[in-house]
Amino acid sequence: MRKSIFKATVLVFILSLAGKGIGFLKSMIIASSFGASNMTDIYYMAEGVIANIFYAVTMSVSVAFLPMYIKKKEEGGVKKSYQFSTRVVTGLGLLSLLLTVFLIVVAPILVKIMAPSYSEIEKDQTALFLRIMSLGILFSLMANIFQNVLNAEKVYEFAAFSSIVNSLVLIGMVFCFQDKIGIMSLVFAMPLSYLIQFLFLKLRTHSYVGISVKFGIWGSEVKELLGQSLPILLSNTTIEINQLVDRMLLLSIEEGAVTALSYSAVLFQFAAHIISLPLSTISFTEVSLACAQKNEEKVQSLLNTTVRTVVIICVPVIIVIFNASESIVNLVYGHGLFSMSAVGQAGRGLAFYAFCLIPYCLKRIVTQAFYSVQETKIPMLLGIFEVIMNIAASIILSRIFGVAGVVMGTALASTVFSAILLLVFSWKEVNLGIRKMGYLLKYATIAGILFLLARICPINSDSFWGLCAFSSLIFVGYAILLLIFRDRLFLTMVRGLQQKMKGLLKK
């Protein structure tokens, strides 16, 4: 069982790395082609709202869907799970069409709330972008449900590979139509990418889920799903409110700040998703299955191992990002129309995004653990507390530290929230043995030593090879420190790799 979980995690990691690499290339092409200007601020303002609506709607439904799908399959077999998934996709598809129409109608009102300082021409442009991008909500919802069906069936590789489609479509649109329609190529790419991803996933999921009114579009199961989804939706909506406040703060700080910090967020999410996505994808499915089987011991083992793995992986990544943030931004975006001023803005933001890495990964994993036991209200209530704290901290710190202060507020709130979330899950649901997490003090000590070594390191990270040398030194130093401190999980990983290499050499 552990070997199959490990293999699945490695496979998803490789595909996630490829997907994020292509996504990374996408952001580099956008930065080089369009730079950081008032027009890109308008695009990212609209894109941020739509992306977060996609996130709020699709994630709330699809995340609540997976544990219910697994439970239906455990209790009633493939036939019951197929009927359930088909009812859900068909019914929610119709609801998403209504949401799209609503957004198209209220787009001008949303823009007035989001960007009151914009001129009338800028508001009209933002509303147009919002309306075009909203056409992808239906396909985004269905694609996310299809991905979760495949994850529930443990067809992880196809679900992970489908995410690459979005970036490929956007890159293609920029190359083909940038000279003709400019930034509108990005706007049209969003709904088109979700349509193509939906069609791609439909080919693989036809035996698990259909689109038909044959089994009805409403019922007690769909009502239960919506009941589970509503707290998740409210929680995700607070995230959008938080990010809207952040953008409004950035608009008042300096021109191009919204765009610059958007690029910082892309770099941060590249690292965060590569670490969290494989771990959370596998753990969510396995924990949901263990919960359906009422196996608390397995839930405890899975979550403890996942939490410890997150911490052990994130420590050196945080050290590298914080100490080489401006070099990273300059190497990735510092060409074309992307100015050195924008590099400085994005670099400052990225440095403090590094401290969001562990909280981000833990939030994702522990929140999904709550959803696995079909408890959605607690993460919602704690999420509201996090947003209030985040907004207050960002407002205060932005007045002192400018652009970096907005990210510092996010890091502070995320750290507090993730710690509380972990404690509450251990108290209310499954005892994780929090008192046995003394290893966190050991990792904090190692991180402190590593940080000091990074600060006195003579290697210049401004060039690509310099950054590679600096990063390698940090990771090698980290491995040596883990060996010195005799870290159990790290030693287990090393032994596993040694056995794998011996097996390959024998073959």
Image: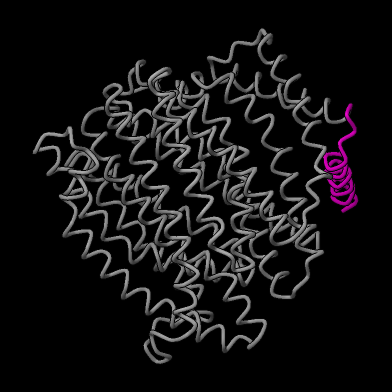
**Is 482 left or right of 425, judged from the image as shown?**
right
Residue pictured at 40% horizontal, 40% vertical? 26
**Residue 65 percent coordinates (x, y):** 52, 71
Task: Give yes or no for residue 97 being in the magenta stretch.
Answer: no
**Residue 85 percent coordinates (x, y):** 49, 79
Task: Give the main secondary structure, helix, strand or loop, of the magenta stretch.
Answer: helix
Q: How is the image coloured?
A: one colour
**Residue 11 percent coordinates (x, y):** 66, 54
**Is 319 left or right of 301, judged from the image as shown?**
left
**Is 227 left or right of 422, judged from the image as shown?**
left
Task: Give yes or no for residue 505 being in the magenta stretch.
Answer: yes
Split into 4 quadrants, where in the image is the N terminus?
bottom right
Quadrant in which residue 112 is drawn: top left
Residue pictured at 42% horizontal, 55% vertical? 55
Q: Is residue 412 above or below residue 494?
A: above
Give whichever of 150, 250 is nearer the camera: 250
- What residue span does the magenta drawing correspond to? 484-507
Q: Is residue 349 above or below residue 282?
A: above
